Each structure stands twice: as C-alpha cells, then as structure tokens.
Amino acid sequence: MVKIYTKKGDDGTTGLWYGGRVEKSGLRTDAYGTLDEACSALGVARAMCDDSQEELAADILALQNELFVAGAELATAPEAAGRLEDGISRITAGMVDALDPEIDKYMAHVNLPPKFVIPGGNRLSAQLDVARTIVRRAERAVVRIQLADELASTEILRFLNRASDLVFSMARYADVDFPDLFEGRRKSGEDEE
C-alpha cells in the first residue's frame, strides 16, 4: 500500500517543487491551491457531459491538464524558475495564444445578449460557471504574487485571463438550449408590479 501522508505539513507548511517550504496560507500556495480547486470543478463539469458532448469533454480535459502546468509553475519558487520546462511545468505564450481559437469555436454557436448572463441554464453550464469563477479567483491570487514581486513570468496571468474566457464560452455553449436565460431576468411575472 502506498502511503500518501508524509507528516511534513503538520506544521502548516508545504514543500515547493525544486525545494523550499512555504506556509500553506501563503500567496503562492493560495494560488496553486485555487487552481487545484478550479481543476476539480472542471472535472465535475466534464463528468456531466453526455455522449453528444464528447468534444466539450475533451476540451475541458485539455484545459485541466494546462491548469496543472500553471499549478506546477506556481508551486516553484522564482529562483528555481529556470528549471521549469515549457508546456510541462511552465505556461508559454503559445499555450495562451492557442486558447483564442478555442474560445471562438464555442462562441460561434452562441448569441450573447447585451446584458449579464445569469448562471444556471442547466447543470453543466452552471458547473462551468462555478469553475470559471474559481479560475478568476486564481487569477486574482496570481496578481497578488505579481504585486509582491514573486512572479517569474507574466504569461501565467495572460493564460488564466484567457482560460476563464474559455470556460465562460464553454458554459454559454452548454446553455444553447436555454435561450430564455440569456435575457438576464425572469421571464414569468416580469410585467408584474
């Protein structure tokens, strides 16, 4: 049996890739922990995809893998950033640029209203919106790392900004069968006083 506990974190610290320990409440740990949460939320969304949504499920899985790359980068102290590998443990400009056509692919099937979209058109789109908000929270956490001058590369910020846009577009695509929700308000009783 493989034991998953090391007991090293019992003191409230955690180990970084390539050495060093930081507080579990630290900026870096908060950021990659939030990415882990986003990846898990996307996993729930992927599990909700039915047989007609195989491409969406595959794209969600691809994004989950890329979030792990971002997490690995964040779990590395800036002084060890030179040891990271592009696309494996470091986000690249190419990875960011590749998200734009994915966003466009989903948005080509969606007519957005000139109003806010209320999440909850169906279970899948609602779960994708939960994942999107978690990616946004991770982005804010990475901004705090940048403001503390502890971010080795800003590509990760570009990536997270675009990744949340991708998840938004996936959620809207999953909402296509629920056009009334794009109105941004309740249909029944909207004329009541």
Image: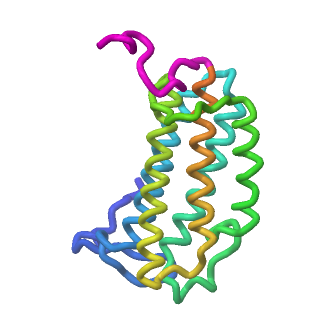
Q: Nearer the viewer, residue 192 or 125?
A: 192
Q: Position of residue 91 (x, y in %)?
A: 65, 68
Q: Residue at x 58, y 83 (%)?
A: 81
Q: Is residue 159 magenta?
A: no
Q: What's the magenta bit mostly, secondary-structure-wise?
A: loop
Q: Residue at x 41, y 84 (%)?
A: 20
Q: Is residue 188 magenta?
A: yes
**As displayed, is residue 94 above or below residue 15?**
above
Q: Residue at x 51, y 81 (%)?
A: 18
Q: Is residue 85 left or right of residue 154?
A: right
Q: Is residue 105 left or right of residue 143?
A: right
Please, which residue is most extreme toward the front here?
Answer: 193
Q: Residue at x 40, y 10 (%)?
A: 188
**As displayed, is residue 27 above or below residue 34?**
below
Please, which residue is most extreme toward the bottom here?
Answer: 79
Q: How is the rendered protein coloured?
A: rainbow
**Which region is colored magenta?**
177-193
**As displayed, is residue 189 above or below residue 178?**
above
Q: Nearer the viewer, residue 58 or 138?
A: 138
Q: Is residue 125 left or right of residue 87?
A: left
Question: Quadrant of residue 84 in the image?
Answer: bottom right
Q: How many numbered marks are there? A: 0
> Dividing the image into 4 quarters, which one contains the C terminus?
top left
Q: Nearer the viewer, residue 171 or 34?
A: 171
Q: Position of residue 138 (x, y in %)?
A: 45, 59
Q: Position of residue 171 (x, y in %)?
A: 57, 34
